Amino acid sequence: MIAMLGMYDMPALQPANDRFWSLIRGHLGFGPTHLTRGADVWDVWHSPDLVFAQTCGMPYRTRLHGKVQLVGTPDYGVPECPPGYYRSILVARQSDPRNLDQLADGTFAYNEALSQSGWAAPMVHLSRHSRLPTTVLETGGHALSATAVAEGRADYASLDALTWELLKEHTNLGGELREITGTQPSPALPYITATGQDARDIARAVRSAIDDLSPADRKLLHLRGLIDIPADHYLAVPNPPPDATKLLDP
């Protein structure tokens, strides 16, 4: 059996995530003793032994829909978003006065091409409201994208709104970067389970676990509840336009 909470699992949050999973497991009555860390996420998401994990909206709608079950969507209380929704925050260096249109002449850092908040949402936003970047830099993670901007290896980046809050709370990057704009809200990163599991029972356990979290852990994880967002809401989120996809070609 596998359980993994790798999407928001920076070192400062790992003990709280461990306690969260322990509560979920206690309400379920089964599951692995410890969270999996360091495994390939695709292996975890596709595993028939998956009890509980979190994925991203773009992987869900493009590759996982029909192969996993939705458990529910955590509500992180993201500002300017409905419960269970989030958005991307585009950031640049504090010392860089350029606006979004001017920044498009520089390098855009993104975590990976199957990220809703790091790639899909900003590409849709830029294609509608400004223009696509001239050059892109793949970093492998939101924090790495933020660091690339802070260090001058990229000019701007798009971060998951919750990750941006966590970086401001737990690193110095919040003081080195500034917000440029935010994208339209979309359903947040859903909890999933394998097709052979009882998704409703797992959702019940997750809701009970959130209720049982200490106020400190709930605040640390930004967890407010579990929302039922239908699969078709995830599937309706637009993918990046073809012109953006061409930027990924070597």
Image (cartoon, rainbow, N blue to C red):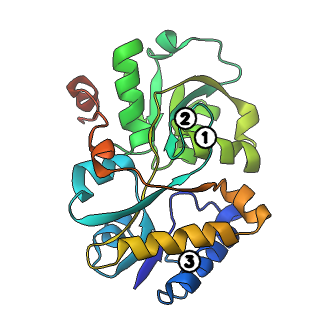
What residue sits right under mark 1 in the picture? 78
Tell me whether the residue at label 1 lies in contact with that at label 2, contact meaning CB atoms closer than 8 angstroms.
yes
For mark 3, give the secondary structure: helix
Residue density around tag 2, few if under 14, some if 14–19, many if 20 or more, within 10 Å = some
Q: CA distance from mark 2 to mark 3?
A: 26 Å
Q: Is residue 3 above or below residue 71?
A: below
Task: Give the residue at x 74% y 56%.
Answer: 219
For mark 1, give the secondary structure: loop
57 left or right, relative to 151: left
Q: Is residue 134 above or below residue 219?
A: above
Q: Is residue 166 above or below residue 237?
A: below
Image quarter in which the N terminus is found:
bottom left
Give residue 134's position: percent from left, percent from top.
Answer: 37, 19
Residue type at numbered disc 3? Ile
Task: Give the residue at x 39% y 20%.
Answer: 126
For mark 2, give the secondary structure: loop
Task: Give the residue at x 78% y 63%.
Answer: 215
Instruction: Return the residue nearer the eye: 142 or 193.
Output: 193
Residue type at numbered disc 1? Val
Q: Quadrant of residue 228?
A: bottom left
Give residue 229's position: percent from left, percent from top.
Answer: 40, 50
Give residue 118's position: percent from left, percent from top.
Answer: 44, 39
Instruction: Tell me which label, 3 or 1, sits earlier in the chain.
Output: 3
Q: Quadrant of residue 2?
A: bottom left
What residue sits right under mark 2 in the picture? 81
What residue sits right under mark 3 in the picture? 24
Residue 72 visible, this orientation: yes
Q: CA distance from mark 1 to mark 2?
A: 6 Å
Tell me whether the residue at label 2 lies in contact with that at label 3, contact meaning CB atoms closer than 8 angstroms.
no
Residue 39 visible, this orientation: no
Residue type at numbered disc 2? Cys
